[in-house]
Image (cartoon, helix red, strand yellow):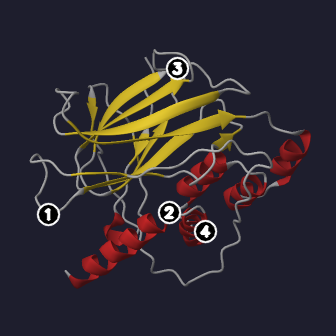
Amino acid sequence: MATPRFLITSTAAALALQSFGFLNAPIQTPSAFNPLGLAAPALAAKTTYRPPLRPRPTLRTDGTGSRGCYQKNQPVLLSLLVPERHVGQTVSARPSFLWYLENAKFAKFALVETGVPKPLLEKTLQASRAGIMRVELPKDAPELAVGKEYRWSVTVLCNPNRPSDVVSYTQSFIERVAATSELIRQLGSAKSDLERARIYAQSGLWYDTLSVLSAASEKDPIARSEMLSLLEQVGLSNVTKQARKNEQAAKLR
């Protein structure tokens, strides 16, 4: 059975990104880590996110918590990488979901269709360090349907074998929309992932924009710079500030 992949990255070098494969075991652990710093020259951001013309309103909430299972005086920080006041859109049948997690080890991801109690996907992940985690909807899970809204959530657990031992919880929504002929034409003429991300951003497609930028960020310093700017454009400065703070701390070690 196919399993989804997830990405976890260290903020010790400013929102680093690295892909990992899921293991077949219930708990997935990263097998490699490739830090990326902000050593590249500061570049003007060109990826400008324009929200949908008729966005569905919502309110992003960040999860915080503190339990005895994690270090004292270091609260768990959980932030879904989504727009602050509207439902993000995608044209992908199998989109990626990203969130920032710090001071925690176990996170449970769930994706549910509105009005349907059984989740489309549930996965428990293990994080070895602070950073961004990523889940992609696998091929063996149902595709997202055009015109439908889905709820996704992340729950931080003390013990993955005790689901009721919740430290922090937060949720958001995603809506799949149909790709327009103009979008398809523009994407067909794009010469790089960075160009594709900018096209998605101008079309109000949050999840597609972030997914492309996060993947490109592994090797492209311009994409890294534009991804940080993208997060700040939708009110996620708490994530980028913490990333830069951790980078400075890493330099002093």
Question: Are there few (<14), some (14-19), or many (20+) residues within 10 Å of tag 2?
Answer: many
Q: CA–CA distance between discs 3 and 2?
A: 29 Å
Tell me: residue 41, above or below residue 111: below
Q: Are marks 3 and 2 in contact (CB under 8 Å)?
A: no
Q: Residue at x 60, y 52 (%)?
A: 85
Q: Quadrant of residue 47?
A: bottom right
**Residue 52 as seen in the image, left or right of residue 117:** right
First along the sequence among labels 3 and 1: 1
- Is the residue marked by circle 1 packed among few (<14), some (14-19), or many (20+) residues within 10 Å? few
Residue density around tag 4, few if under 14, some if 14–19, many if 20 or more, within 10 Å:
many
Of the residues shown, which amino acid type is indicated by label 2? Answer: Leu
Badge 3 or badge 2: first in the primary sequence: 3
Amino acid type of the residue tagged 1 in the rendering? Asn
For disc 3, the marked residue is: 141
Marks 1 & 4, CB-CB < 8 Å contact? no
Question: What is the C-alpha distance between the residues marked 3 and 1?
Answer: 39 Å
> Disc 4 designates what residue?
226
Residue occupied by mark 1: 73
Mark 1 to mark 4 CA distance (whole Å): 33 Å
The answer to which of marks 4 and 3 sits earlier in the sequence is: 3
Image quadrant in which the C terminus is located: bottom left
In space, the residues marked 2 and 1 are separated at their CA atoms by 23 Å
The residue that label 2 is drawn on is: 236
Residue drawn at point x = 36 percent, y = 65 percent:
35
Residue at disc 2, secondary structure:
loop
Q: Are marks 4 and 2 in contact (CB under 8 Å)?
A: no
Q: Quadrant of the N terminus?
A: top left
